[in-house]
């Protein structure tokens, strides 16, 4: 009710209020007793491949979104949204019926035409203020990399990680104001830094500064891709990890529990999916102006962890123990 009242006060327009409330009602948390069902709802309302429309956020909208993300990281959840976002997104606390914990959730809700699809494709961001691990689980290709959004949200919860970032559209959604332009892939957040997904990643970098944290991106590869392996790990670069590296530790911990898995790492020449063009990886590995929007350059941190998996390896339960052993 507070959401409806605030919109009424801000706009005084009953039609607008009704359309936004109708669009928001499915994914506000009231009908989603767990984060898994909330994320599934967000996924099901995303702009789809070659049919849904993705709208590139404006610089003021990106700045406003980053301000909200920063406030959430500092523990804020009961805060007023900026005016340029208040008719598009919702910020609220959600109590998960499964684990009983409360999370702060920022998500797009506006659906002005009532077609069951959100208007922009901004996505969602979730924070656990009582987290035990400074891990950010990131899902850049929901729908396209089937099951990775459900895998990541369960891993996020059960490893007591700090944040979850969910892209807001299929990576092949149509750019607003154009016909189908597959080569552009404007909606693909790993290629386009002008997205709320990338803005969230950048704000996390600003929040942590030199303090340790890790961004773990969950991706899915087709069965016919990298046939010699089941899982491939990299830092967004082609170079092999050095002894003591976290992805080597993760590989060791996975194999200790899943000895039949075929797990390769960058530099092994078993799989070439090293995410070298991933803009979040480039930002965290080398924050040059092209990726950072002005952040000073920093040395490679090895804190970007890129996971490629075949379809049969996306069960979150298979990963949780190894992740907690790697980041105790």
Image (tube, rainbow, N blue to C red):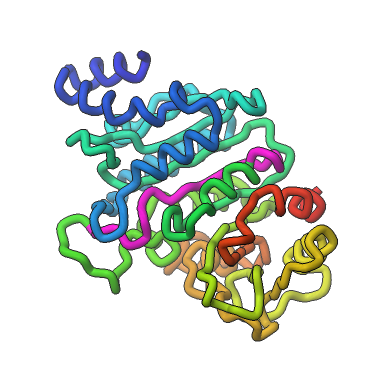
Q: Nearer the viewer, residue 198 or 223?
A: 223
At 72% from the left and 44% from the top, the residue drawn is: 133
| Residue 207 rendering spot, x and y as whole percentages | 58, 45
Can see residue 294?
no
Q: Identify the residue shown where x is 28% and y is 46%.
A: 120
Vertical comparison of 274 with 62: above or below: below
Q: Is residue 160 magenta?
A: yes
Is 267 above or below relative to 27?
below
Image coordinates of residue 48 in percent, x first then y, are 31, 53
Among the 4 quarters of the image, the one containing residue 113? top left
Residue 14 in sight from this viewpoint: yes
Quarter of the image where the N terminus is located: top left
Q: Residue at x 71, y 71 (%)?
A: 263
In the image, what residue occupies the spot 71% across and 43% down? 159
Measured along the vertical axis of the image, is residue 263 above or below residue 167?
A: below
In the picture provided, is 188 more to the left or to the right than 70? Answer: left
Up/down of 227 relative to 76, above or below: below
What range of the chain is rendered magenta? 157-175
* Picture coordinates of residue 24, whole percent (x, y): 33, 29
Q: Quadrant of residue 162?
A: top right
């Amino acid at each position: 009710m507070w959401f409806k009242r605030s919109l009424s006060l801000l706009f005084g327009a009953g039609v607008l209020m009704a359309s936004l409330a109708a669009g928001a009602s499915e994914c506000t948390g009231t009908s989603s007793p767990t984060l898994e069902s909330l994320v599934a709802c967000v996924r099901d309302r995303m702009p789809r491949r070659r049919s849904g429309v993705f709208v590139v956020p404006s610089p003021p909208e990106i700045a406003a979104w980053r301000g909200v993300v920063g406030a959430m990281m500092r523990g804020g959840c009961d805060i007023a949204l900026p005016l340029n976002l208040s008719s598009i997104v919702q910020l609220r606390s959600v109590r998960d019926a499964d684990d009983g914990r409360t999370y702060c959730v920022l998500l797009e809700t506006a659906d002005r035409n009532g077609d069951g699809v959100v208007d922009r494709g901004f996505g969602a961001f979730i924070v656990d203020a009582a987290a035990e691990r400074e891990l950010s689980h990131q899902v850049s290709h929901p729908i396209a990399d089937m099951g990775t959004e459900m895998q990541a949200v369960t891993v996020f919860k059960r490893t007591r990680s700090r944040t979850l970032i969910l892209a807001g559209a299929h990576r092949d959604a149509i750019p607003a104001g154009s016909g189908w332009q597959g080569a552009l892939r404007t909606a693909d957040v790993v290629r386009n830094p002008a997205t709320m997904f990338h803005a969230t990643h950048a704000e996390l970098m600003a929040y942590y500064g030199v303090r340790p944290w890790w961004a773990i991106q969950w991706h899915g590869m087709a069965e016919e891709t990298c046939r010699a392996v089941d899982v491939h790990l990299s830092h967004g670069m082609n170079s092999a990890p050095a002894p003591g590296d976290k992805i080597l530790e993760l590989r060791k911990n996975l194999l200790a529990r899943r000895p039949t898995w075929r797990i390769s790492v960058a530099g092994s020449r078993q799989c070439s999916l090293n995410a070298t063009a991933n803009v979040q990886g480039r930002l965290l590995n080398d924050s040059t102006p092209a990726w950072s929007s002005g952040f000073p350059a920093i040395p490679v941190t090895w804190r970007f962890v890129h996971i490629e998996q075949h379809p049969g390896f996306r069960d979150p339960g298979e990963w949780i123990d190894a992740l907690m052993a790697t980041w105790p």
